Amino acid sequence: MTSDAPDRGSAAPPIRVTGLRTEFGDTLIHDDLNLDVKAGEILGLVGGSGSGKSVLLNTILGLKTPDAGKVELFGHDIQEGGERDEVERRIGVLFQNGALFSALTVQENVEAPFLEHSDLPMELVGKLAALKIKLAGLPEDAGAKKPAELSGGMRKRAGIARAIALDPALLFLDEPTSGLDPIAANEFDELIRTLRDALGLTVFLITHDLDTLHAICDRVAVLAERKVIAVAPVEDLERSEHPWVRDFFQGPRGRAAQRTYN
Amino acid sequence: MSVPGHNPPFEVGVESARYELRQSGEGLCLAIGGDWTAFGLGNLPTEIMRSLTEGSRPKALDVQSLGHVDSAGALALVEALGSTAPLEASDRQDLRRLADLVGAPSEARQVTEPAASAINTFFARIGRQVERFIGQIWAVMDFQGRLVVALGRHLRNPKRLRLTPLFSVMEQAGINAIPIVMMMCFFIGAIVALVGANLLSTFGVSAFTVELVGVAILREFGAVIAAILFAGRSASAFAAEIGAMRMNQEVDAMKVMGVDEFDALVVPRVLAALLMVPILTFCGDIGGILGGLLVSWATMDISPVFFLERTVDTVSLTHFWIGLVKAPFFALVIAAAGCGKGLAVSGDTESLGKGVTSAVVQSIFLIIMFDAIFAVIFMELDL
């Protein structure tokens, strides 16, 4: 017999964006943008520079108030205070440069969410943090180091360790493989997939890395013309007739990645 | 906590974790319930460990009333049970997955340094402090040497001077500070006049208040208040600006482009301070005299005209020059402390905060120290 945790109504999609509009002064960034992320999938978001990917991420995270429309995480409207705290501790974020607290060691960085949100005994928190650091693929002695002493790739891993500290249901990654060498980037892709499988995560990632899209993304959302113009597996997008999507996936780099993975 | 008319929330509250130790056929059985998550566990792990004596580890696990479980809960369970076997034998899929993730209890361990003996730590601390102190002296001398060289370069070839940042700093650190310096000195002048009038009137010589205000403001307060305000406003700004540029690798970018960071960042700030602190001192003098004048007028009916006449007659011009002569020295100290601390910032935010703080503390300390030295010098010179 196989059972699982009792279902307490997690039927709502992890992320649902409806009719989102964002504008900076006279510039319209998003107009009537809709996006649904399914539970358990790895969704990649692509779009040209300046198409508002980071703005969309900030809006979903509640760091920016939408000018119109609604963002729901697990069925909660994030703009309606109240249950924010509940939602916040179910999500983990890896910012582009790791955004680690530079005054703390890696171990303390990973412990920070526990100290903020739980009453666990310190000893267990220390062990949990060490476990998450190990899960993120960092060597054991990395915990005692300050972020400034780490390489770029290790800093990202430390950022992931902090993001998965509280076993989030939803993980946001902003350009996880940018600035990594191809070997480190491959390892990082692998890490994301392993973590998704081990922790049952839903992953929302912004990336330009065609290899990442091919290797780990279940679906890819394309942000262009101020809205999400397509959400589909990479193979379907490669056949798309839309000019931007075609240029993106059928350019020289796109073809190279396609050859590797098909 | 569910809001009516809302989608079913992802997690309806958290049920506190609980446990029970039962004696069953094969030995001790740990029955757990509630949410074994980072939020539901609380201090439970410590309690369990306390209630378990060595050798009486539960062999079986009852998860009948277990709610949610996450890696924190799984780790606590593994710690209590001493192995992952009961979790792997459980019929809960998520528990088996987490058991796999958490691993055997001996693995993921926090790295702790072996505790050093007390006497060792004591001497290590002293050693580190001495090393840091020598390092600081070295850094200050290094900075001063480079500053002198950079200023010398500018003297030999004045075209090197970057006028745009010079004027920009002069405006921000100097001109914009004039109102606050005048106001502060105005109040100081007023206070000196009030206290002086009170004291001197008991001797029947309240007219000497004018001299008191004149000497105190021109000789000491004008210069010192202007310098302290400049330190508070601008030494901090210099350290923060240059420190942020260091953190952002802008200073490195400059070096690579062949731009000397002293030419581009330090010299304009030092020169701007050298030019502006005397002007601020002058403005402070005016503000202080005005403050004294107003109070004398209001409390002792000394008319403004009489006040100014008496100031000119009795307060020798030497006092004004003594105040003004100190200003460039203060300026040099403040700008050097600000820029030096800014350049010493390393990668993390903490060192930026420390740099800004110590720039202000150091420059104010040095201002007061220099003022004391000057007081002794001028006294010996009978000025």
Image (cartoon, coloured by chain):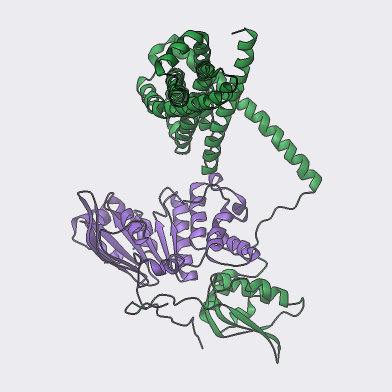
Chain colours: A purple, B green
User: Is residue B323 in view from this perspective?
Assistant: yes
Most extreme residue toward the bottom, as rendered?
A: B25
Q: Which residue is drawn at 52% across and 35% down?
A: B356
* Figure check: A106 above or below B291: below
The answer to which of B230 and B196 lies nearer the viewer is B196
Q: How many marks?
A: 0
Residue B259 in view of the camera? no
Q: Position of residue B247 (x, y in %)?
A: 47, 38
In the image, B335: left or right of B31?
left
**Looking at the image, which is closer to me, A248 or B349?**
B349
Q: Tell me what residue is drawn at x 60 percent, y 64 percent.
A: A125
Can you say whether A52 is above or below B138 in the image? below
For the C terminus of chain B, the quadrant is: top right
- Is A260 on the left-hand or right-hand side of A162? left
User: Horizontal and vertical percent for residue B59?
Assistant: 69, 83
Q: In which quarter of the image is residue A219?
A: bottom left
Which x, y percent locates residue A79?
Answer: 34, 64
Quadrant for the N terminus of chain B, please. bottom left
Q: Residue A186: x and y, percent?
A: 44, 56
Q: Quadrant of residue B297?
A: top left
The residue closer to the viewer here, B26 or B35, is B35
